[in-house]
Image (tube, rainbow, N blue to C red):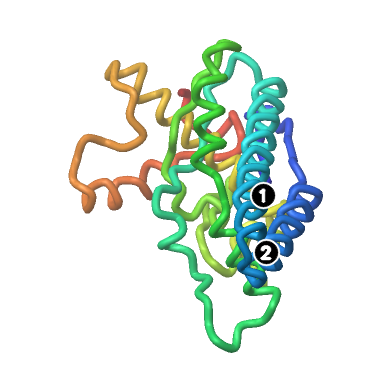
Amino acid sequence: FAVASNLSGKAFFKSGKETLRHAERFQKARKSLQQKGTRSAVRRLVALSGRERRFIADVNSSLASAILKTYPHALIGVEELTGVRDRTERRSRPNSSEQTRKANRRCAKWSYAELLGFLAYKAPLVGSLVVKVDAHYTSQTCPKCEHCSRDNRPRKGLMFVCEGCGYQLHADLVGARNVGLRALLVRQDWMSTGRLSCAPDVSDAETKAARPSRYAELRWSPDTSPRL
């Protein structure tokens, strides 16, 4: 469900297996009640939907608390994923497999915004702050040499293998490290301008052109990264 890392390399992994099993049980029960279509089934369906919403909210609240407890008094960078459902490559097809349909259901019910909401309001209570950063290519860019390529993710799996320097790591952890480095750029701009923003005050085209050059300065090593 979540992977986080600080600049000293301390990693946080939250497995989603048990939560997804609960979600699948909700999905099966909802499908069964929808097929019946009786008044009692509709009433039970409404009650089931309420339980499901409360379950997801509880999971996100607990996850936010766990992240903030692991990294107290921190500037926490999170990926800016507005419109992620529209950008996802997964599309439903008539002949799609059951595994693909399950993945689509999970994406459709992904409550990322709710998790960010819990993080945002809980962070100040422990002396932390949450900022959104650019999410483009975070899991395809090597944090050691900054080589960016889709082929860094062999067979689109969870293992990251850099074509340039051979650096290997869990792909989600690579993404978390890149997000952390980009959060440092946000802090650098904040300290120099007094304005808290995850993007320069220019047009979208100029912003996209400026990002690669700025990110190219970042390395997962205090010896080679700029002093922020």
Identify which residue, 13 or 206, lies in the foreground. 13
Residue at image position (52%, 64%) is 149
Q: What secondary structure is found at the residue carrying circle 1? A: helix
Q: Is residue 142 left or right of residue 161?
A: left
**Is residue 143 at all visible to an observer of this figure?**
yes
Q: Residue furthest front?
A: 39
- In the depicted structure, whether residue 80 falls above or below residue 130: below
**Amino acid under disc 2:** Leu
| Residue visible at 50% across and 59% down in the picture | 148
Location of residue 141 (image quadrant): bottom right
Q: Is residue 144 visible?
A: no
Disc 2 packing (10 Å; few <14; some 14–19; many ≥20): some
Farthest left residue?
203
Q: Give me the residue at 29% from left, 21% from top.
A: 195
Distance from the alpha carbon under mark 1 to that under mark 2? 10 Å
Identify which residue, 55 or 1, lies in the foreground: 55
Q: Position of residue 103 (x, y in %)?
A: 64, 66
- Residue 66 point in image, percent of width and height: 71, 27
Q: Position of residue 2 (x, y in %)?
A: 66, 42
- Mark sitting on residue 157: none
Of 2 and 22, the residue lying toward us:
22
Question: Which residue bears the numbered disc 1?
Answer: 48
Callout 1 amino acid: Leu
* Circle 1 Cα neighbour tier, 10 Å, few/some/many (<14 / 14–19 / ≥20): some
- Could you tell me if the residues under marks 1 and 2 are in contact, i.e. CB atoms within 8 Å? yes
Instruction: Please give the name of the residue rendered at 42% of the width and 62% of the height, measured from the top-left corner.
Output: 87
Which element type, helix, strand or loop, lies under badge 2? helix
Q: How many marks?
A: 2
The residue pinned by badge 2 equals 33
Q: Does residue 31 appear to the left or right of 180 in the view shown?
A: right
The earlier-in-sequence mark between 1 and 2 is 2
Nearest the eye: 75 or 127: 127
